[in-house]
Image (cartoon, rainbow, N blue to C red):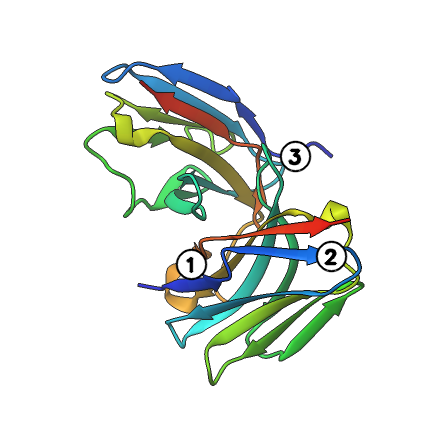
Amino acid sequence: EAGVVQSPRYKIIEKKQPVAFWCNPISGHNTLYWYRQNLGQGPELLIRYENEEAVDDSQLPKDRFSAERLKGVDSTLKIQPAELGDSAVYLCASSPMTGAGLYNEQFFGPGTRLTVL
Amino acid sequence: GENVEQHPSTLSVQEGDSAVIKCTYSDSASNYFPWYKQELGKGPQLIIDIRSNVGEKKDQRIAVTLNKTAKHFSLHITETQPEDSAVYFCAARFTGGGNKLTFGTGTQLKVEL
């Protein structure tokens, strides 16, 4: 079974440029997460989707970040315009449908390493 | 919100020795505690997890213990091998956050020959 797929794996851009990351979750996984991982830190949640609905986007900087999961399968995370502080690894994860009392494992993709110059 | 502290930040052991990584969490309502291993250039991979109604769980050479009263949990790796070298993250899920995990800052484990 294929794992979580992310592309591109690496991206170098200049500040103020736009950038987009793509994620394809494990087949059948309803829940999709985008995390940001700064160097030497643990992942921090940006947004969580249940199917096509963003159910938690409280940590997403909405002035420059946007995300979509139009058909409830793959997802795109966009930054426009990028800033120097956005340099990080952007991780996508997926899990089966969550619910009260469920402890579903989150499966992570390899991430996209973004460098903003 | 939930806060998770992890220690030590780096840990070096000799092959065959044991390694212990400790985490504390702030929200007493947290009920699920996974541990992830992250190798260079890869995403985190779940290695073991424990729920709040269990005090200890073991899977071959790795084990996790949970002390709910003290709000801390630990990862124990016995008979360490060079392939155990990686960054390890603890995480906690609190009941008010859906399936949102709060991660620790990571421990760089190096197993030396």
Q: Is residue B42 visible?
A: yes
In the rendered structure, which amino acid carries the disc numbered 1? Gly
The residue lying at 63 percent from left, 35 percent from top is A27
Query: Which residue ends up furthest to the left in the rendered image?
Result: A63
Say what secondary structure mark 2 lies in: strand
Camera-side residue: A95 or A37? A37
Q: Position of residue A61 (x, y in %)?
A: 24, 37
Q: Is residue B88 above or below residue A93?
A: below
Q: Which residue is mark 3?
A: A3
Question: Depth-wise, is mark 2 or mark 1 nearer the camera?
Answer: 2
In the image, which disc is placed on residue B14? 2
Few, some or many residues within 10 Å of mark 2 (<14, 14–19, 20+)? some
The chain holding disc 2 is B
Query: Which element carries disc 1, helix, strand or loop?
Result: loop
The N terminus of chain A lies in quadrant: top right
Side of B23 relative to B74 (left or right): left
Element under label 3?
Answer: loop
Q: Which kind of residue does numbered mark 2 sit on?
A: Gln
